[in-house]
Image: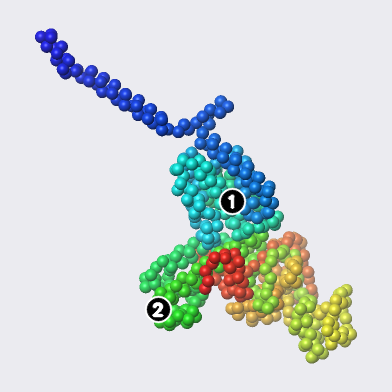
């Protein structure tokens, strides 16, 4: 029996021995698997100077440092101050401050900040950049090849991304530029490495980058409305004409400038508006949104998009600081009072004719004058007054004009030989006495400039009822100037309170020197955004947009 039991044990192992056998086999398999994995694994760390270092990060820093030193050598050889050299200098400073550590890559993957920044660059058309100014196609291509295990390729992705971010930040703040040596611009770009390094450590990188944009009401409103306009444009562009609903069509025709109403109604009939569009662009007049009519509408909306980009660029070009200012928008025929970065009030204005356009510039209002006199510019005397004076000897007296010399002394009109080619020379001036019929009206605002332009009242009040108000010789005529004058003296005159109305009633000339200068921007902005994110387009009264669009965006469409 004992022999039989041993035979049984040999033929049929016990349960415990069976478990030990399978455990041993499993151990060998695990060990073999471990060595296989070990042989294929790239060692992530090494010891340098008794410190444990991530080998990929360490190699990245070496290559970045090498690339940065190459940029330093390149910039020393090329002393031009174009934007490429300036951004190269920013790259050097940025990575030196980081001790050449990557900002966007980490071993074999990009980090979450890279995802945030590439999404922002991908949406740059929503910020007024119609083309790929920031090489996002290249960045995506490098990202797609990221897993090829070429470290140098990953560094190319790193540096290309940083370059594009700096360019984006420069364009956001100062507009599309290839060369700018102004002090404001140079002072700004010096801060960019520090701004970006701080932004990378913030939870919302996008908001930090976008915060560099100018805080101008017109810029802010336009930027807020642009995405809605782009979505409308794309809806029209990529929808078959027969399936575009009337609400979308009416709004599109309004934005395109074909109609003055954003809805179809009894005064704005759909068929009539389409007929007008077809007639204007010499298409078959069937009053239907057919393929050719649809194509023209899409092109008109695309041109409006380029106009919007141009106006955002103009606003970014504007050198602005401060929360309180006046903003004259020439094509809108409005003066906006901005207080604490919000619009407080708006006034109607009259601007220069096409032959004598109101210039575009910025200055500071220094004086408010009640009951001003008018010293007539030489150009107006030569081109408009001299022949009237020669023809009618009473013309000057009847219109309240008199002659003064360089010492502000009155001169007898009869002593002037008006038949001479230049009867006044450099010795005499024509001046109009102060009264309600004075060309400047009863209030004048003085701000230094090289254009002999100022803001003033006018006796021609009926002109403010006109839709197109281009009537002046370049100066800006203001509706309700007494109201603006009172606002300025209440807020920027620290001496005794002044009642502008009382000063006007005194009929004497009064000069109020403001205690604080008030910034005034006179600009040419042909579209704006509204509070409900709609867009408003104004007439291009001086025909500036098309040529400027060609200059700033040379690949734009032709209408």
Tag shown at residue 455: none
Check whether the beta carbons of the residues at disc 2 and disc 1 lie within 8 A of each other. no
Q: Position of residue 164 (x, y in %)?
A: 56, 52
Q: Is residue 219 visible?
A: yes
* Label located before the other in sequence (2 or 1): 1
Tag shown at residue 288: 2
Q: Pointer 1: residues within 10 angstroms few (<14), some, or many (20+)?
A: many
* Nearest to the observer: residue 38 or residue 196: 38
The residue singled out by tag 1 in the image is 166
Q: Marks 2/1: CA distance?
A: 48 Å
Residue occupying image coordinates x 48% and y 33%: 44
Residue occupying image coordinates x 62% and y 41%: 96
Task: Find the residue positioned furthest to the front.
Answer: 77
Q: Is residue 434 visible?
A: no
Q: Secondary structure at mark 2?
A: loop
* Nearest to the observer: residue 16 or residue 365: 16
Residue 558 versus residue 18 in the image, above or below? below
Q: Is residue 361 left or right of residue 393?
A: left
In which quadrant of the rendered image does the N terminus lie?
top left
Residue 143 versus residue 3 in the image, above or below? below
Q: Position of residue 168 (x, y in %)?
A: 57, 54
Q: Is residue 80 left or right of residue 41?
A: right
Q: Position of residue 538 (x, y in %)?
A: 57, 72
Q: Secondary structure at mark 1?
A: helix
Q: Position of residue 487 (x, y in %)?
A: 68, 66
Residue occupying image coordinates x 61% and y 68%: 548
Residue occupying image coordinates x 83% and y 78%: 429
């Amino acid at each position: 029996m004992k022999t039989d039991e041993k035979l049984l044990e040999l033929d049929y192992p016990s349960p415990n021995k069976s478990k030990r056998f399978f455990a041993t086999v499993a151990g060998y398999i695990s060990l073999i698997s471990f060595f296989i994995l070990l042989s294929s694994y790239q060692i992530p760390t090494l010891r340098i100077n008794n410190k444990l270092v991530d080998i990929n990060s360490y190699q990245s820093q070496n290559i970045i440092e090498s690339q940065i030193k190459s940029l330093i050598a390149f910039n020393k050889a090329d002393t031009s101050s174009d934007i490429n050299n300036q951004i190269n200098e920013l790259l050097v400073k940025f990575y030196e401050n980081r001790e050449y550590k990557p900002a966007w890559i980490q071993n074999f993957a990009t980090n979450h900040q890279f995802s945030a920044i590439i999404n922002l660059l991908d949406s740059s058309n929503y910020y007024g950049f119609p083309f790929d100014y920031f090489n996002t196609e290249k960045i995506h291509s490098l990202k797609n090849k990221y897993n090829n295990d070429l470290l140098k390729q990953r560094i190319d992705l790193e540096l290309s991304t940083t370059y594009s971010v700096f360019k984006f930040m420069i364009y956001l703040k100062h507009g599309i530029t290839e060369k700018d040596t102004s002090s404001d611009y140079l002072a700004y770009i010096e801060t960019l490495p520090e701004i970006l390094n701080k932004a990378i450590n913030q939870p919302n990188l996008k908001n930090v980058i976008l915060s560099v944009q100018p805080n101008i009401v017109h810029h802010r409103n336009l930027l807020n409305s642009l995405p809605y306009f782009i979505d409308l444009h794309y809806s029209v562009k990529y929808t078959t004409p027969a399936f575009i609903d009337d609400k979308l069509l009416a709004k599109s025709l309004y934005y395109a400038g074909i109609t003055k109403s954003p809805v179809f109604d009894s005064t704005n009939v759909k068929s009539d508006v389409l007929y007008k569009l077809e007639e204007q662009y010499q298409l078959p007049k069937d009053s239907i949104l057919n393929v050719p009519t649809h194509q023209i509408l899409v092109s008109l909306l695309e041109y409006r998009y380029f106009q919007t980009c141009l106006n955002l660029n103009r606003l970014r070009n504007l050198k602005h600081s401060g929360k309180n200012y006046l903003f004259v928008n020439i094509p809108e025929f409005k003066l906006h009072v901005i207080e604490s970065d919000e619009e407080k009030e708006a006034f109607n204005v009259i601007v220069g004719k096409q032959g004598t356009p109101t210039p575009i510039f910025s200055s500071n209002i220094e004086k408010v004058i009640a009951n001003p006199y008018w010293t007539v510019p030489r150009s107006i005397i030569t081109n408009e007054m001299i022949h009237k004076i020669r023809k009618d000897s009473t013309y000057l007296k009847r219109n309240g004009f008199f002659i003064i010399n360089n010492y502000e002394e009155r001169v007898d009109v009869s002593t002037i030989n008006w038949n001479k080619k230049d009867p006044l020379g450099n010795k005499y001036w024509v001046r109009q006495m102060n009264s309600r019929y004075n060309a400047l009206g009863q209030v004048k605002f003085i701000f230094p400039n090289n254009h002999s332009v100022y803001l003033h009242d006018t006796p021609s009040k009926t002109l403010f009822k006109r839709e197109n108000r281009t009537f002046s010789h370049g100066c800006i005529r203001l509706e309700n100037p007494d109201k603006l004058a009172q606002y300025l003296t209440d807020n920027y005159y620290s001496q005794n309170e002044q009642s502008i109305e009382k000063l006007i009633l005194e009929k004497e000339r009064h000069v109020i020197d403001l205690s604080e200068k008030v910034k005034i921007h006179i600009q040419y902005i042909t579209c704006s955004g509204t509070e409900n994110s709609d867009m408003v387009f104004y007439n291009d009264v001086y025909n500036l947009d098309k040529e400027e669009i060609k200059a700033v965006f040379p690949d734009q469409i032709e209408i």
